[in-house]
Image: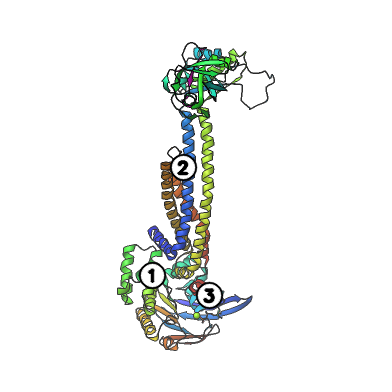
Amino acid sequence: MRGVDLIGFAAGGLRGHRLRTILSLLGVSIGVASVLLLTSLGEGARLYVTGEFASLGANLLIVIPGKTETAGLAPLVNTAPHDLTLEDADALLQRVPAIERVAPIVVGTARASAGDRSREITLLGTTHDVLEIRHLRMASGRFLPREQPRAAVCVLGAGAARELFPQENPLGRWVRIGDWRFRVIGIMAPRGTSIGMDMDQVIEIPVETALRVFNRSGLFRILAEAGSHRDLNRTQEEMRRILRERHAGQEDVTIITQDAVLSSFNLILRALTAALAGIAAISLGVAGLGIMNVMLVSVSERAREIGLLKAIGTTHAQVISVFLVEAAVLSTAGGVVGLIVGLAAGHGLQRLYPDFPIHCPPWVIGAALAVATSVGLLFGILPARRAAQLNPIEALMRRKA
Amino acid sequence: MIRLDAIERTYVVGGSPVRALKETTLEIQPGEYVSIMGPSGSGKSTLLHILGCLDRPNGGSYRFAGQETARFSDDELSSLRRHRIGFVFQFFHLVPRLTAAANVELPMVFAGIPPDQRRQRVEQVLEVVGLGHRAGHRPDQLSGGEQQRVAIARAVVMEPAVLLADEPTGNLDSGSGREIVELMERMNRQGLTLIVVTHDPKIGDRARRRIRLADGRVISDDSP
Ligand SMILES: Nc1ncnc2c1ncn2[C@@H]1O[C@H](COP(=O)(O)OP(=O)(O)O)[C@@H](O)[C@H]1O
Ligand SMILES: [Mg+2]
């Protein structure tokens, strides 16, 4: 039997019972559309988050005090880690050739006030180079000076500037933080949340001043930027070696690269996408049951036709393929409809919420169709076998259903 | 062509066996015109189904064209039905969604014959049964006699050696029933072996050879 004829005959069989066919077709459509949408959402979230990280710069290395490695036995000599100091940051810049910029970071929350206004803000002590390392942009004024790391000046995040100085231009004004007074020398362009820190609510001050404000000796972090993405591992090794040397031979810092963070986020979010797709796939399974039901009804309604097919010499395998192909045509058609609906819904969502990350990877389209067809084939097996096993004589004797 | 030897067919109904055919022995030559008559429940249909390889006997031997059918696999029996045997039923059994032409074409579709060859042959056969002008009609647009003629066209489209008809006029008025029988007789005169099951003596007595069944046994077999 020719393939075209098989598909033609099978498709013809579907026209016999329109409503049931359409309903089960819709079942598959819903399944495929939801797989498509949820996958797009998951994939969109992954691209959004990894994009956020990538915007920090792929050559970024982050030094965190303390060893966070959990593998292996607890250390025999449990000494407190050394502080990460400004001198450490300098040493990294001076002694590791690949490193072009460093930005020491001190973070804490504090109450800031100007005039009679006051609010809780995040105080970020750092140096000039953070501007380039974190790709920050100024709205007006200047950023922290390169020299004078102890100056009593500050740069306001866009939100903090708006709230502390709603009416006036903050440039040149004073902000009080605890017992300290800082002159405003610059205002940041709005940035929004970047890896968990609302940059708009941040006030930046020179790093040494921040250490004194918080009465700390150790840094929160050192951001280091390498000149090129290559040899990042070797750069990391050199940094580790220098810091070990400076910390009396103790390996008491953790250095993470953007790559490592990125790839673990990637992993997590891929798993999330898969989980979402898996949940949606349950609806495809339900749709498969719908197809099975329609096909079973079809087989019993068309018993006489099946009996006749056997009388004219149709083989067991041919009867099976007729009903399998019928189920596959049904589910594939449902898949096509679901694909169109899913893509349209994705577009609609994107229109309504332009900030919402939605991304439909092209392979999902092919995969959704393949899955739809397979659902039909899988759930068509039982009805098809039942058809092929009908006793032709009994089938022919049945009155119309 | 056809040779039955002590064929047995037993159904189990409610735990007790019913012998629908008992030691049936029969030989039919190519080109014969045979009628099978007998009261209802005498085993006529059962015999026809076994002759047509739609059913297998429980015992005895059935040779078709010299070959023992008991040794055939299901697929080989399918092939035998496809190429050598045509069936005509009391209730026509046309596929309601297909046109007359498509119904006639069906055996050729499943036999994998290419479309242009199929079209030609369908046209030819519909012409033979006098329905050339009805090719595009669906069964519910045709009279009973016309539907049965489509069924006959379908039965002979693969040029079988034997045509088996089970009460082919049972659902028709006497006029169209007569036309149907005459149509099959014309085919028989061109060499097709014709076996007609009927309980209507007016039909059955037209055959050159008349077999009578009663209670699963051949009680008479008058050949001229
Ligand atoms: N599928 C079946 N199951 C049980 N008994 C059957 C079946 N088919 C036929 N019979 C029995 O076999 C006998 C012969 O039936 P059948 O060949 O249909 O007779 P006829 O066609 O001469 O009326 C009857 O007693 C009938 O009840
Ligand atoms: Mg009968």
> Mark 2 to mark 1: distance in Å?
47 Å
Query: Does the magenta segment cover residue A134?
Result: no
Query: Does the magenta segment cover residue A151?
Result: yes
Q: Residue at x 46, y 14 (%)?
A: A145
Label 3 SS: strand
Percent position (x, y) of residue A105?
A: 53, 19
Label 3 sits on residue: B61
> Mark 3 to mark 2: distance in Å?
66 Å
Task: Characterize the local packing of mark 3: few (<14), some (14-19) or many (20 or more) Cα atoms within 10 angstroms.
Answer: some
> Mark 1 to mark 3: distance in Å?
34 Å
Q: Chain of mark 1?
A: B
On screen, A273 above or below A130?
Answer: below
Mark carried by residue A336: none
Label 2 sits on residue: A40
Of circles 2 and 1, the one toward us is 2
Label 2 SS: helix
Observer-nearest residue: B58 or A123? Answer: A123
Q: Are marks 3 and 2 on the same chain?
A: no
Residue stretch rendered in magenta on the structure? A142-159
Identified by mark 1, the residue type is Asn
Q: Are marks 1 and 3 on the same chain?
A: yes
Of circles 3 and 2, the one toward us is 2
Percent position (x, y) of residue B163?
A: 41, 76
Ligand 1 is located in which of the four quadrants?
bottom right
Label 1 sits on residue: B103
Identified by mark 3, the residue type is Ser
